[in-house]
Amino acid sequence: MRLGLNRRFDLGLTLRSGQFFRFAPDGDGFLISDGDRVFRCRQAGRDLEIDGTDEAHARRLFGLDGSHVAALRAFAADAVLAPLLADYGGLRLMRQDPWQCLVSFVCSAMSNMKRIQANVEGIAAAFGRGGAFPRPRPLPAGALRPIRLGWREKYVGQLFATVDPAWLEGLAGREFEDVRAQLMELPGVGVKVAECVMAFSLGFGEACPVDVWIRRIGRRHFFGGRRATDRRIAERLRQRFGPRTALAQQILFAAARDGRL
DNA sequence: GCCCAGGAGATTT
DNA sequence: AAATCTCATGGG
């Protein structure tokens, strides 16, 4: 199926930006796994070719809606973001399967993108079917050991044994602080991981995950180089970008990792 | 050997 | 409430 794109979108940049981990190069496109959906995807200029899923899913997953244009217009007036839009304007905020997203970011703690991807793929390969991400279920003791998750292993095991995906999906659209507090009751989920799940799978545009990169550039660009708590940094970004904070954060993250900030 | 990586949780101050 | 410690592993 071919999907017309009349707005800015860069598939490769979006996939590699660190919000999603289940993709692999496939010819001149990608093989993508989002929850129980596995499909191929290829971008040719303003066309997006998808094979194995439907248009509604692809548009939702890649954030292909009109809100992006308005966001770019707002960002163009921002002194920090404006210089980045030429290279990062095609980076979209994805909306992936919440359960897969939750496990991915619990695995992300004090890790790096290559290893996170290997860990998440390892979990899918060991317990999933046909590339799909395995649904929660109690796993045999020691079954996660070969995945080499380190001290995240016990958290992932507990999540598989206790989380109800329907409950997780039901958090979308509810009150921000309430959702974050509920996510933080889960093992291995603190402020940062909770806001990742909210930003990348539950549609909370005000979410602002503060990791080492955002902390660094947040201090440099929004606090005059002075120290600031993660909470203050997130507050300032929210005040500056409102419901587009999550997208702004993702652009800043990608640019910072590229040495652009 | 060192330091760092999309942190969380428990303990100490 | 903020600073500190530990957790396991791979890469530069």
Image (spheres, coloured by chain):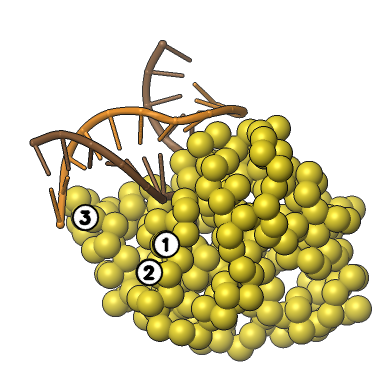
Chain colours: A yellow, B brown, C orange
- Between A218 and C7, the one lying in front of the other is C7
For residue A67, side relative to residue B11 (left or right): right
The earlier-in-sequence mark between 1 and 3 is: 1
Q: Position of residue A214 (x, y in %)?
A: 38, 55
Kindly state the secondary structure of the residue where label 3 is placed. loop
Q: Position of residue A93 (x, y in %)?
A: 57, 71
Q: State which quarter of the image contains the N terminus of chain A.
A: bottom right
| Residue at the image point whose x is 56% and y is 51% from the top | A158
Numbered disc total: 3
| Residue at the image point whose x is 40% and y is 52% from the top | A211
Q: Badge 1 is on which residue?
A: A185
Kind of residue indicated by mark 1: Glu
The earlier-in-sequence mark between 3 and 2 is: 2
Give the number of the mark in front: 3 or 2. Answer: 2
**Dot 2: within a 10 Å radius of its alpha carbon, few (fewer than 14), some, or many (20 or more) residues?**
some
Kindly state the secondary structure of the residue where label 1 is placed. loop
**Dot 3: within a 10 Å radius of its alpha carbon, few (fewer than 14), some, or many (20 or more) residues?**
some
Q: Badge 3 is on which residue?
A: A228
User: Against A244, is A253 above or below?
Assistant: above
Q: Badge 2 is on which residue?
A: A181
